Image (cartoon, rainbow, N blue to C red):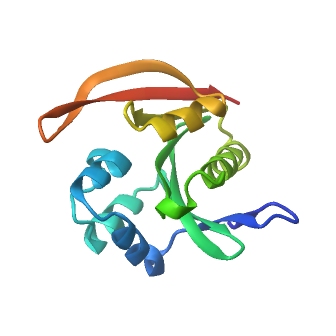
Amino acid sequence: MLIKRPGSRYQLKPFTAQDYSLLMDWVTDEEFNLLWGGPVYQFPLTIEQIEKHIARPEVHPYLFQVEGQTKGYVELYQSAPKQCRLCRVLVANESDRGKGYGRMLLDMAVEKAESEFGAEVVSLAVFEHNFRAVNCYRGMGFETYQADRATRVFNGEPWTLLQMKKLL
């Protein structure tokens, strides 16, 4: 189902097979792949990996559009009754970051989690050194409830994963 606020220039639309190449173009290196996708995808992304992941019934992927232009991606993962996780959140182009698109994308995803999936809790995981994302999530009312030290290591550097949630 397409989510569009009345009179809004923003919308979430279902991610389909025709959109796979967008993700493959946006995720350009191994470090970014891990930062964005965690362990779900190996770099480089392939159609087979994307198909296998989004075929899971609990995974609901969407593209974020502004005035008909695709600007980002997000997944809602239905982790349990009344609970959703925000996963693989992305404002695709660096030039579009810092313009409030991430917050709008997240607002719409949280709204969708609540209205379509009956979520009362929305959670997410973000690497601690992804400062922009952490600040955005905190500004939206997400609170850290756990810090998993060294869950991933990239080029010998341990990354801490913050587990965050928001009650709806």
- The C terminus - image quarter: top right
* Residue drawn at the location 37% of the way across and 20% of the way down: 147
Outermost residue to the bottom: 18
* Residue drawn at the location 43% of the way across and 35% of the way down: 125
* Residue 141 x, y percent position in the rendering: 66, 28
The answer to whether 12 is drawn above or below residue 167 in the figure is below
Quarter of the figure with residue 21: bottom left
* Residue 124 x, y percent position in the rendering: 49, 36
Q: Please indicate whether residue 165 sits to the left or right of residue 34 in the image.
A: right
**How many numbered callouts?**
0
Quarter of the figure with residue 63: bottom right
* Residue drawn at the location 63% of the way across and 50% of the way down: 109
Q: 25 or 4: nearer the eye?
A: 25
- The N terminus - image quarter: bottom right
The answer to whether 72 is drawn above or below residue 124 in the figure is below
* Residue 54 x, y percent position in the rendering: 41, 61
